[in-house]
Image (cartoon, coloured by chain):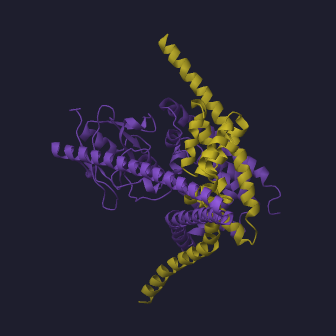
Chain colours: A yellow, B purple
Amino acid sequence: MDFLITLAEGFIGMFQEGGDTFMGLVTDIIPLLIALITAVNALIKFIGEERVFAFAQKCTKYFFLRYTIFPFLAVFFLTNPMCYTFGRFLPEHKKPAFYDSTVSFVHPVTGLFPHANPAELFVYTGIAAGITELGLSTGPLALRFLLVGIVVMLLRGVVTEFITARMIKNRDRQSENSVA
Amino acid sequence: MSNYKAAKVSKGSSGWGGPLVIQPDDSQKYIVSVTGGGIHPVAQEIADKTGGIAIDGFEKSVEKNEMACAVINCGGTARSGVYPKMGVLTVNVFSNSPSGPLAKFIKEDNFVSGVTVDHVEMADGSDEGVQQKRTGEAKDEQNESLLDKDVAKKTKEEAKQKVAAKEASEGKKKNPVNRVIEVLGDKVGFVVSTFFQAGRDTIDTVIKNILPFMAFVSVLMGIITYTGIGDLIANWVSPLAGSLVGMLILSLIASIPVISPLLAPGAVIAQVVGVLIGVEVGKGNIPAQMTLPALFAINPQVGTDFVPVGLTLGEAKPETIEVGVPAVLFSRLVTGPIAVVIAYFASFGLYS
């Protein structure tokens, strides 16, 4: 009988532990998220998508802006997963690079702007919880995550654009050969 | 046309939506299986019953207006929303109900989930065919009425604006103070209602996306910490995420083109690993400075499962998608580890 009681206590204890974790997450993280996401959502509505479209299109000409500002605007204003629709402003051979660049940013953005990808917050929030546990501020980590995220975005854009161009060339050559 | 037959797809025991009647025709003959790893049995079954053509959406890509339906295995929110939004009948082999940023496009007449092979049956000949047509017509009517409504709304708004403008101009003539109050009231109303809607969207997101994942994380953490599995995992995670070499190995493994699409869906694995690393950081087993490179080490696979869908959203042509999928996957093999190195050097001076 004692054994059964220990078993039952262990069983409940396990979920008590889970409940405590849940309570911690809700009280530590949710209030800030709600205030922050509401403010950014309102800002996006005030600015309006048309104005963003017009500005974003100007950024597509130069590779530096194309894989930094352009995907940043896509992720910030359209959020995951509608941000990929910005690909339509680009020529075909640059679309894979844009996708790679943009999708790489949907987690770095969440440190400071969680509204952009609320369903996948815990990549950042999980690790940042450890920083909070140590009694440190998560601000420096969030900022550096965002900045390195932009560098990685540029890197992936350039590398994937190069690889795509090579693959298209190979394919064209192959089809020419098969015709000849 | 006579080669194609209608099939009825109903929801599984824990599924949602439907039943859908799928009727391919000459212009929409493809049953697209966006499930990864070949054609899903459900897609094959639908193709066999209807006479449509089953096709692997990851290998060949199809224009959305050529799809009779899309078969997906999405437990998250992305694919489940994208296809209904594009107006493609969507059959999900996982059980989920509308959620995520595109929830409003997921309707009972374009989405069915929890489907297995047993839920695909022949629609009973002409009877169902008629019904299908009827629902089609009904849909058209709905669209039209919606359009009508929009038009009506617009004209109404225009009329309102005209009236407002008239009143304003009259007000100006009559009393500048009244006009100022009117304009001010209008602006304040706009700002307040915008914030209110933003708040509503936020709470919606918290309930539909954030709280459910927190519940999942909490139960997982409860089990892991209480049973002591946590210590076992820590022995694995700490050396991998605690040094540059360990993280390079981690990122290299996760960016292998065969493995990365398996790890990516919903970023669930990256999120769970993130939480585990966070716990170790909290205990002091992993230096705080290493959190920045760790964020990139656990995530070189991000979005690799979503390339065809993401490119379709960008209105890419099928030829582009065929090249784009391998291009992104191979690019990751190079950029995954490089990202970790960049983050490692960028972490100097962080929390020290």
| Res A53 → quadrant | top right
Image mark count: 0
Q: Is residue A125 visible?
A: no
The image quarter in which residue B275 lies: bottom right
Name the outermost residue toward the bottom. Answer: A2
Q: Is residue B306 visible?
A: yes
- Point out residue A82 in the picture as x, y percentages from the top left corner: 54, 48
Question: From the image, which quarter does the N terminus of chain A lie in?
Answer: bottom left
Q: Is residue B34 left or right of residue B185?
A: left
Q: Residue at x 56, y 57 (%)?
A: B164
- Residue at horizontal 66%, vertical 38%? A157
Is residue B218 toward the left or the right of residue B49 in the image?
right
Q: Is residue B196 above or below residue A8?
A: above
Instruction: Determine whether, in the image, residue B27 is placed left or right of residue A164.
Output: left
Q: Position of residue B168 (x, y in %)?
A: 60, 58
Percent x, y of residue B33 = 39, 42
Front position in the image: B198 or B283: B198
Figure quadrant of residue B286 = bottom right
Say whether residue B222 is left or right of residue B234: left
Q: Position of residue B351 (x, y in %)?
A: 80, 63
Front-most of residues B321 and B341: B321
User: Toward the viewer: B163 or A133?
Assistant: B163
Q: Residue at (63%, 56%) from the top-left corner?
A: A46
Query: Among all residues in the image, which is located at the extreme top?
Result: A180
In the displayed structure, B65 sits above or below B207; it is above
In this view, B192 is above or below A178: below
Q: In percent of the image, x 60 and y 48: which residue is there?
A: A49
